Amino acid sequence: MSPIDVMPCRERLEPVRVLELADQLPGLIFQLHRSADGHLHFPLLMGSGIQLLDLEPERLAENAKPALEQIHEDDYPALMAAIERSERECTPIILKFRFHLKASRCRWIAVRAQPQRTETGVLWHGMMLDISEQVAEEERLRQLSDSDALTGLANRRKLLARLDEEISLSNRHATPLSLVMIDLDHFKAINDTWGHLQGDAVLRELADCCRMLLREEDLLARLGGEEFALLLPLTSQGNAAQLAERLRRVIADHHFEGVGSGRITVSLGITEHRVGDARDNLLQRADASLYRAKHRGRNRVVADD
């Protein structure tokens, strides 16, 4: 049976019915015209998604500028480049951007449009869809894949990806980069004495203690168990050692709920990136420094020789 045989009706839809169906679409059907002098306007805007623009269609039929001005400043260059490329190469426009609405709201919009050359310029036939919920869900899933479920810190996967980025920058610009390994001392004894639930609470509280002393660009990650890592961009080993010592003192003096003060300590090992270093070299040196801190009695900071 051919595909058309399963259609309930072979009659062509009346124009009025087509308009009614278009108004029921969750997105926005549009035509965007660009004249030879670069003027942009929307000859056609249809669908329930017109409300996404928060603008009068009559205004946009004369000039697309009011809509373009509401596109997020970080996304505007990519959109204009896509329009230029589509006009030049006669290829579809496929991208997403953020669109500012009233009351400081911002929505993610996906666009797909096919160009057609005309006597007066280029006419794109396309559709816009509000994909804000989809983008939010993707971000939620990304956060889950990059985060430690217990502490909310970055996980090992996130740390290694960020470490690769920062090493590349350090190699390219010869900027300082330090890595600190942090290990909670005698964690097994904590679990054995107060229980695993209390041990989990200690890990969460320790993460909060560290967060308060860090800059926005620093990355604190939980590698697993009681081991953490702290990535410090644009930070020399000397400055990293000063911060590590502050962390050590704050944690040693902190009153951990259900445990008390002076019972929780950490050992810290530090190394600084050397131009040309591979990621594994940096990790191994930081681990070696941490091992020396443990070997020398714990509750101390040891920097790479």
Image: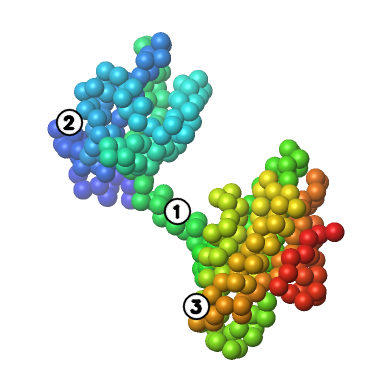
- In the figure, 237 relative to 248: above or below? above
Residue that appears at 17% across and 31% down? 15
Residue closest to the eye, 48 or 231: 231
> SS for tag 3?
loop
* Horizontal side of residue 274 vs 21, given as left or right: right
Q: Earlier in the sequence, mark 3 or mark 2?
A: 2
Which of the numbered marks, if any, corresponds to residue 268?
Answer: none
Q: Secondary structure at mark 1?
A: helix
CB under 8 Å between callouts 3 and 1? no
Give left or right: position of 168 versus 101.
Answer: right
Q: Which label's residue is closer to the chain start, 1 or 2?
A: 2
Looking at the picture, tell me which residue is in the foreground, 273 or 296: 296
Q: Which residue is mark 3?
A: 257
Res 94 visible: no
Q: Give the residue pinned by disc 2.
A: 15
Quadrant of the rendered image containing residue 179: bottom right
Residue visible at 80% across and 66% down? Answer: 288
Q: Residue at x 54, y 59 (%)?
A: 212
Structural crowding at the residue carrying mark 3, measured as other residues with C-alpha within 10 Å and reported as few (<14), some (14–19) or many (≥20): few
| Kind of residue at disc 2 | Pro
